[in-house]
Amino acid sequence: MECKDPKCPIHGNLKTHGYQIEGVVVSDRAKKTVIIEKEYSTFLKKYERSLRNTSRIAAYNPECIDAKTGDTVQIAGTRRLSKTKSFVVTKIINRASK
């Protein structure tokens, strides 16, 4: 099956820029959209402790990549695709075991 998606960064003409982010897919319910959760830590100077945070990023999920919940993926920045999507899934690093 050949990908005919014009918004695919591999087979289409969507350009990516900026840096690559790794994260885990926590939701794939929306059509052609996945929600990626990325964990990061912040140092609080006042309390001399680290705080763990998570950020949730909506990303475009091309048909040829088709990431599912639990997959570890790499996303890249792109032009604004919708109100919430400014990222696209470029590759799957680790598939979730079923």
Image (cartoon, rainbow, N blue to C red):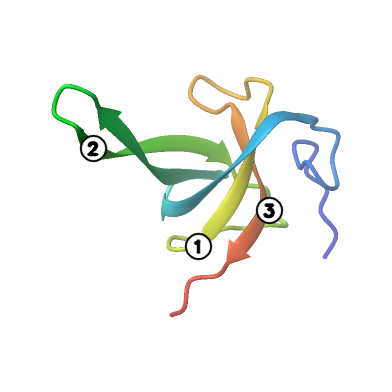
How much space separates mark 3 and mark 1, taking CA atoms?
15 Å
Mark closer to the observer (2, 3): 2
What residue does disc 3 label? Answer: 63
Name the residue rendered at 79%, 32% in the picture.
14
Crowdedness of circle 3 by 10 Å Cα count: few (<14), some, many (20+)? some
At horizontal 73% and vertical 57% (from top left) the residue drawn is: 64
Q: Quadrant of residue 53?
A: top left
State the separation of the CA atoms marked 1 and 2: 25 Å
Whether the residues at callouts 3 and 1 have beta carbons within 8 Å, the answer is no
Q: Which residue is mark 2?
A: 51
Q: Quadrant of the C terminus?
A: bottom left
Residue 77 position, x and y percent, is 65, 30
Front-most of 27 and 29?
27
Seen at 50% across and 61% down, the residue is 68
92 sits to left or right of 5: left
Residue situated furthest left in the rendering: 47
Q: Count all numbered tags in the image, as a single digit.
A: 3
Residue 81: x, y in percent? 63, 25
